[in-house]
Image (cartoon, helix red, strand yellow):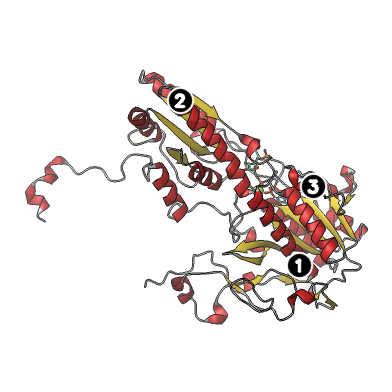
Amino acid sequence: MDLVPPPEHSPTRAELEVTTLGPRAYGSPLAGLLAGRRTTEHYVAEDDRVLLDDTVSALAAHEGLADLPSFEPGGPRRRLFFDPRTVRAGIVTCGGLCPGLNDVIRALTLELTTHYGVRRVLGFRDGFRGLVPRYGLSPVALTLESVSGIGESGGSVLGSSRGEQDPEEVVDTLQRWGIDVLFVVGGDGSMRGALRIAECARSRGAAIAVVGVPKTIDNDIPFIEQSFGFQSAYAAAAEAIRAAHVEARSAPAGVGLVKLMGRHSGFIACYAALAHRGADVVLIPEVPFALDGEGGLLDHLHRRVRDQGHAVVVVAEGAGQEYLPASRQRDASGNAKLGDVGVLLRDRIQESFARKGEELNLRYIDPSYAIRSVPANAYDSVYCMRLAHTAVHAAMAGRTAIVVGRWRGRFVHVPIPLAVSARNTVAPDGDLWLAVLEATGQPPRLGPPLLEPLPAQWNTPAVRTA
Ligand SMILES: Nc1ncnc2c1ncn2[C@@H]1O[C@H](COP(=O)(O)OP(=O)(O)O)[C@@H](O)[C@H]1O
Ligand SMILES: O=P(O)(O)OC[C@H]1O[C@](O)(COP(=O)(O)O)[C@@H](O)[C@@H]1O
Ligand SMILES: [Mg+2]
């Protein structure tokens, strides 16, 4: 068995340790449910840990048990840092919309009020702006009544925004409202913001727990299996591919072209294409492709249309940026503004078929925001609830500067510095991309053959016997 060295970014045991606010002096109202529980395949005891690696070769690469990288498990603790009778909680949703935001808000509120007996839950509006006085956004009380049924609609009842805010001002507001626990529902940027808030609170000696619930349709947060809302988003994206496929198949020389969100990661494009199985080519930021020339995208598309009469191309919005003018534009949070690769491909495909005098009926579909404004599907609704429960258990136990996630089926606590240390992207040598190549039949490389063909004279027998 080849020992596979842990990937260079494999975190150390120390990087997986979570920050806690102090001793847990209070009994949990859930303690009765936990009596006698121990680790099984269905449950992880609170003093156990969850392994990061799950292959024999990866585990064998470590010195011994103590050296194995592992996460602190999520789940209710018998003892709490906060007194549930006095603790006050805040919830904020930040960054781009994502299916399930309202499910998380609802589940956080219900778990806090119903199971921990927390009497005060405040919702801060329009992302971190709601925590900065100059925006004049007063918080709203979140109660069983006010969150009832909010999961039926997409978006966030609290609103969201982008744009960095001063953590000092945010902590001032938290202290002014007497907030002990802040739940930040957001993506990579929000987690960076959450970390700065946690660090600012700690520098003031303020015992405030900041716990992240990782959100993004991009699925670009590492060390969690999938971000909530990702499945609902790619299900909506698959509908756009279905439409493109129907259109392309119903017209002579029909080509359906679909551009999907996902920023610098191609997960939505991959999973949506696998879900619908109608795509002939998937283009993602992680796998470069040649546009022109032998074996390039356009060459492949001409052949595919000629052979089967139609074709469907799915392009992730972050792909092909090298063919677009470099833009230094950034959004309010500093995220790079992407060039529109969908329009580029639409125009280049039309030009190529016109230049060759070949018929083309091109249908371009950019579902854009439609894939992230949908309500959560059943899977994500459940996932949102379970992430929210895990976040409440962690916060009440005094964990801070962590995001909650699920790793190989187990709910775990991921230190925020680790969660923002890298971007989760599609591995070109991974099984997901292999599945896409198998489903589409596209060549592993869209471009000129890597090796020039052998010169003809090399195929003489004299050489072949060598
Ligand atoms: N590097 C950063 N440091 C501190 N706060 C940040 C940082 N990046 C983003 N934020 C905060 O997180 C919020 C959301 O970030 P953004 O990148 O827009 O979305 P997402 O968190 O969904 O990826 C922003 O409103 C901003 O207040
Ligand atoms: O909402 P905006 O500013 O138009 O940004 C669009 C971007 O937001 C996303 O939908 C999700 O981004 P975040 O969840 O990380 O905020 C990306 O897929 C997309 O590129
Ligand atoms: Mg983001």
Query: Which residue, given by chain and number where applicable, does mark 1 sit on?
Result: 393
Query: Which residue, given by chain and number where applicable, does mark 2 sit on?
Result: 250
Q: Position of residue 265 (x, y in %)?
A: 55, 47
Query: How many marks overall?
Result: 3
Secondary element at tag 2:
loop
* Amino acid bearing label 1: His
Q: Label 2 neighbourhood size at 10 Å, few (<14), some (14-19), many (20+)? A: some
Of badges 3 and 1, nearer the viewer stands 3
Q: Position of residue 43 (x, y in %)?
A: 64, 72
Secondary element at tag 1:
helix
Secondary element at tag 3:
loop
Is residue 121 positioned above or below 161 on the image?
below
Q: Quadrant of residue 57?
A: bottom left
Which circle's residue, 1 or 2, is located before the other in the chain?
2
Check the picture and name the quadrant holding the C terminus.
Answer: bottom left
Q: Position of residue 274 (x, y in %)?
A: 48, 45
Residue 62 horizontal side relative to residue 15, left or right = left
Inspect this view and state whether residue 262 appears.
Answer: no
